[in-house]
């Protein structure tokens, strides 16, 4: 059985002793391999792992979907809680400058520590510069080709190029394809490459369309045109189920539920999905 446990999300399952925060962390159990996909901001990760009965020492690796602090912020605490080196898989651009436009000046939203800082705590980085399959039935998808006309760089997210601030292409966006018992499932941190581009990359790698998209979609802060086109395309994807949380936002999640009906479910800390 392949099982996905939501460790960190913006919202929390009813009647659980878990902490919520603006972030995402998913614990995946697949064919004897335990992976943590993202680590949240850091405050909720270790308390929630303990409450859920999940032992950090049992992890085989960490996968980072991208370098934003609400996905990488808990890595420091996780590394400190372990007694052995921790493989960390991500695209090298996770450590590129990541900023958010805010007055009076852009704010750094990248990883709290440098690569060297994490390595001092026991991280062993593995760079994903193309699709990789480090474990049976699991494929890391990065970089994700941008093919749709309506999914572009998120407004207000910046990087530095040649001393200038420019829109951040988030080349580090990395999705995780899981060949579960119910068919291909794809996990996203924020789907900064676009949810439909992620689905296309997963379908290409799996040889057939995914049956599940789970994670953040970043449709909440997306431009209205992207929202409308994405909702239409997701609704028309035959058999696709969507379990969305984090940066999807409650309003957009409600709209997804409206167009997908029973094919939609909310992600929340404490939720467990069988894939």
Image (cartoon, grey):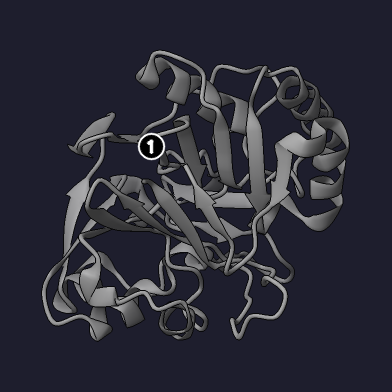
* Residue located at (65% from left, 22% from top): 239
From what the image shows, is residue 100 above or below residue 226? Answer: below
Q: Position of residue 97 (x, y in %)?
A: 43, 56
Q: Is residue 159 left or right of residue 101?
A: left
Q: Position of residue 32 (x, y in %)?
A: 22, 52
Q: Nearer the viewer, residue 274 or 165?
A: 274
Figure check: 51 above or below 100: below
Q: Is residue 11 left or right of residue 185?
A: right
Count of numbered circles on the image: 1
Q: Is residue 92 above or below residue 88?
A: above
- Toward the left, the furthest residue is 84
Residue 244 versus residue 137: which sits nearer the camera? 137
Q: Secondary structure under badge 1?
A: strand
**Neighbour class for label 1 at 10 Å: few (<14), some, many (≥20)?**
many
x and y percent of residue 132 in the render? 23, 33
Task: From the top left corner, tell me how far across and down residue 213 is, in percent.
Answer: 57, 37
* Residue 142 appears in the figure: yes
Q: Which residue does the image show at 75% across and 17% down from the upper left?
A: 236
Which residue is rendered at x = 43% and y = 38% of the image? 171
- Residue plotted at (82% across, 36% down): 261
Residue nearer the viewer, 94 or 216: 216
To which residue does mark 1 refer? 178
* Viewer-closest of 97 and 248: 248
Vertical placement of residue 137 versus 73, above or below: above
Q: Is residue 156 visible?
A: no
Q: Residue furthest front?
A: 1
Asked which quadrant contains residue 166, the reply is: top right
Q: Is residue 103 left or right of residue 113?
A: right
């Amino acid at each position: 059985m392949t099982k996905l446990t939501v460790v960190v999300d913006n919202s929390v399952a009813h009647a659980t002793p878990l902490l919520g925060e603006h972030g995402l962390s998913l614990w995946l159990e697949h064919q004897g391999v335990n992976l943590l996909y993202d680590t949240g901001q850091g405050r909720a990760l270790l308390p929630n792992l303990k409450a859920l009965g999940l032992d950090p020492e049992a992890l085989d690796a960490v996968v980072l979907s991208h370098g934003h602090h609400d996905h990488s912020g808990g890595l420091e605490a996780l590394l400190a809680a372990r007694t052995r080196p921790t493989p960390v898989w991500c695209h090298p651009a996770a450590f590129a400058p990541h900023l958010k436009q805010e007055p009076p000046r852009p704010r750094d939203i990248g990883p709290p520590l440098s690569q060297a800082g994490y390595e001092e705590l026991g991280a062993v980085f593995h760079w994903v510069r193309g699709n990789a399959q480090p474990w049976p039935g699991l494929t890391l998808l990065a970089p994700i080709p941008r093919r749709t006309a309506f999914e572009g760089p998120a407004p207000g997210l910046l990087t530095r190029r040649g001393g200038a601030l420019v829109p951040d292409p988030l080349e580090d966006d990395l999705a995780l394809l899981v060949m579960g018992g119910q068919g291909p499932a794809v996990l996203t941190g924020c789907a900064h490459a676009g949810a439909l581009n992620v689905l296309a990359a997963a379908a290409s790698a799996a040889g057939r369309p995914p049956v599940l998209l789970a994670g953040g979609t970043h449709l909440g802060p997306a431009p209205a045109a992207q929202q409308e086109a994405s909702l239409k395309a997701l609704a028309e994807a035959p058999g696709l189920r969507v379990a969305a949380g984090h940066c999807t936002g409650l309003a957009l999640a409600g709209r997804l539920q409206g167009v997908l009906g029973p094919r939609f479910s909310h992600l929340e800390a404490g939720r467990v999905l069988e894939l």
